Image: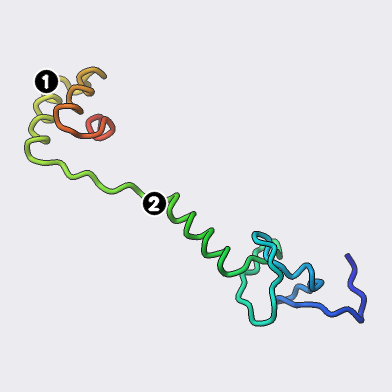
Amino acid sequence: QGIPPTQVVRRAQDFVYHLHCFACIVCKRQLATGDEFYLMEDSRLVCKADYETAKQREAESTAKRPRTTITAKQLETLKNAYNNSPKPARHVREQLSSETGLDMRVVQV
């Protein structure tokens, strides 16, 4: 929309917004002078709270699972099984998983 020269506007860097357009795209809250916000690459605005919430969700979704610690007894059981057969069948891996208490993914690796 065009902006008449008499209308009050808000600015963010080189962008000019109508007052009602100067709002967070997530929560739709109108931003006021002094509010902290993030200007996205597509010139849309996000309030600080919504931006940080989105960043937190992103960090949680990409977080790695914790490393598995294998005890000496578990390692010995796995070594014996893999020495007998370098590529054990699924039922053998399932049995190893139940014997050692390790996840099937760990037994397979």
User: Label 2, on which residue?
Assistant: 63
Amino acid at dot 1: Asn
Q: Is residue 75 left or right of residue 31?
A: left
Q: Is residue 69 left or right of residue 37?
A: left
Q: Position of residue 3 (x, y in %)?
A: 89, 72
Amino acid at dot 2: Ala
Quadrant of residue 93 in the image? top left
Element type at mark 1: helix
Quadrant of residue 20 in the image? bottom right
Q: Position of residue 44 (x, y in %)?
A: 70, 64
Residue occupying image coordinates x 10% and y 29%: 77
Discs 1/2, front:
2
Residue occupying image coordinates x 57% and y 70%: 48
Residue occupying image coordinates x 22% and y 31%: 107
Q: How many marks?
A: 2
Question: As displayed, is residue 5 above or below residue 66?
Answer: below
Q: Is residue 78 left or right of residue 53?
A: left
Quadrant of residue 87 in the image? top left
User: Label 1, on which residue?
Assistant: 84
How crowded pointer 1 is (Cα within 10 Å; few <14, some 14-19, many 20+) is rated as few
How crowded pointer 2 is (Cα within 10 Å; few <14, some 14-19, many 20+) is rated as few
Q: Position of residue 41 (x, y in %)?
A: 66, 63
- First in sequence: mark 1 vs mark 2: 2
Display colour scheme: rainbow
The residue nearer to you, when weighing 87 against 16, is: 16
Question: As displayed, is residue 10 above or below residue 59?
Answer: below
Q: Is residue 31 left or right of residue 98?
A: right
Question: As displayed, is residue 12 above or below residue 87?
Answer: below
Q: CA distance from mark 1 to mark 2?
A: 36 Å
